[in-house]
Image (spheres, rainbow, N blue to C red):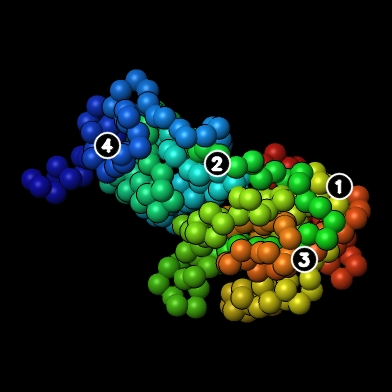
């Protein structure tokens, strides 16, 4: 009988109210939220100008059921939004979670997802403050993150000639993990785990991110690869960004083991230049005053918005939605 009851614990068998009860049992709104989940809206007091962002994860577009790990998906859903808050030079405050799933989805999937979301939010100093549930044919997650500023925001348009270009975190690791997953690799192998883990559950360097306000002239979350993200900074700021060949080679060396496993060492540089979803931070600022935790990877020079490596223009190469070329 116990096994039969467990098999019936789907969203459809429980109903919305009981599903919400199960979800709320995994949420800690913290002390900085006056009214958290459970009412019509959350109530908070922010100590500075409000910063908001939103992002989605859609089954079959952003993840596949065959490698779904709901706890890690919760981490990823939180991280990709919180990293945008930090990239603006802001402090994260709370997350609003909207989730749609088929009615036959097991409640354990939703509970594990919520645990991952809550754990990553707490790691960043934020909380889940509300959300919504619905039913649909695929698992669809939309997260809205709320934060606040204590200083001026860090924009993509602030880079200056002679700024150093820096990375906090990694690039290329999540892209390597994605290709490994598509090739049939799964967690449980020491040679591939670090890359697959970054794809399934990126963990941005929030500690270094807290050091960026007041120093960084420009910044962006490293979600679309060096070519896409630094290209945006260069164009918005009206500068050229020259990547340091030695630094880029060092980054490629980090993911070379995964490229060799897949039988194509050239993939390493491709992942570093064009791979997204690591959710590190790409920033520019005075090179002689760079905070701890940053790796210098290039220089801003007077120009017209180009990104170059060894004198060659680098064009964006990461995945983008709605592109007929992909």
Label annotation for residue 24: 4
Closer to viewer: mark 1 or mark 2: 2
Q: Give above or below for 290 relative to 129.
A: below
In terms of sequence position, does the residue under pointer 3 or pointer 2 come before the other? 2
State left or right for residue 281 relative to residue 287.
left
Q: Quadrant of residue 94?
A: top left
> How many residues crowd around disc 1 within 10 Å: few (fewer than 14), some, or many (20 or more)?
many
**Inter-mark Cα distance, 4 to 3:** 45 Å
In space, the residues marked 1 and 2 are separated at their CA atoms by: 27 Å
Task: Name the spot of residue 1 as percent of width and height, x first.
Answer: 8, 45
- What residue lies at 32% left-to-right and 28% top-to-bottom? 35
The residue that mark 3 highlights is: 298
Q: Distance of mark 3 from mark 2, alpha carbons?
A: 28 Å
Give whichever of 141, 118 is nearer the camera: 118
The quadrant holding residue 31 is top left
Q: Picture coordinates of residue 211 (x, y %)?
A: 56, 57
> Decide: marks 1, 2 in contact (CB < 8 A)?
no
Residue 3, given in percent of the width and then of the height, sits at 14, 49
Residues at marks 1 and 3 touching, judged by CB atoms closer than 8 Å: no
Residue with the mark numbered 2: 150
Tell me the CA gap for discs 1 and 4: 47 Å
Q: Work out whether residue 185 can be spotted.
A: no
User: Label for residue 238?
Assistant: 1
Badge 2 crowding class, 10 Å Cα cut-off, few under 14, some 14 to 19, many 20 or more, is some
- Counting residues from the start of the chain, the first of labels 4 and 2 encountered is 4
Q: Nearer the viewer, residue 175 or 294?
A: 294
Instruction: Tell me the residue at 38%/41% (across/down).
Output: 127
Taking the view exactly as shown, the residue that stands out farthest to the left is 1
Q: Taking the image as drawn, is residue 280 in sight? A: yes
Which-is-in-front pick, marks 3 and 2?
2
17 left or right of 210 in image: left
């Amino acid at each position: 009988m116990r096994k039969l009851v467990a098999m019936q614990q789907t969203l459809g068998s429980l109903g919305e109210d009981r599903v919400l009860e199960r979800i709320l049992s995994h949420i800690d709104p913290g002390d900085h939220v006056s009214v958290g989940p459970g009412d019509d809206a959350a109530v908070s007091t922010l100590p500075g100008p409000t910063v908001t962002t939103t992002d989605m994860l859609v089954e079959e577009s952003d993840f596949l059921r065959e490698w779904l790990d709901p706890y890690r998906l919760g981490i990823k859903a939180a991280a990709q939004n919180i990293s945008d808050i930090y990239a603006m030079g802001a402090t994260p405050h709370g997350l609003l979670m909207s989730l749609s799933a088929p009615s036959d989805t097991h409640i354990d999937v939703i509970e594990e997802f919520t645990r991952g979301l809550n754990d990553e939010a707490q790691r960043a100093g934020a909380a889940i403050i509300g959300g919504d549930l619905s039913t649909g044919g695929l698992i669809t997650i939309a997260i809205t993150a709320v934060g606040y500023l204590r200083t001026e925001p860090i924009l993509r348009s602030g880079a200056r000639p002679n700024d150093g270009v820096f990375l906090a975190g990694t690039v290329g690791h999540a892209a390597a993990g994605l290709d490994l997953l598509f090739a049939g690799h799964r967690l449980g192998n020491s040679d591939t785990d670090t890359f697959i883990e970054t794809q399934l559950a990126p963990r941005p360097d929030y500690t270094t991110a807290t050091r960026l306000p007041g120093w960084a002239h420009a910044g962006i979350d490293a979600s679309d690869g060096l070519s896409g993200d630094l290209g945006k900074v260069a164009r918005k700021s009206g500068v050229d960004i020259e990547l340091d060949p030695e630094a880029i080679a060092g980054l490629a060396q980090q993911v070379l083991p995964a490229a060799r496993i897949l039988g194509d060492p050239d993939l390493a540089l491709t992942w570093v230049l064009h791979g997204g979803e690591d959710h590190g931070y790409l920033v520019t600022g005075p090179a002689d005053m760079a905070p701890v935790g940053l790796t210098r990877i290039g220089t801003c020079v007077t120009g017209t918005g180009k990104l170059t490596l060894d004198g060659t223009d680098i064009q964006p190469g990461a995945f983008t939605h709605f592109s007929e070329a992909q």
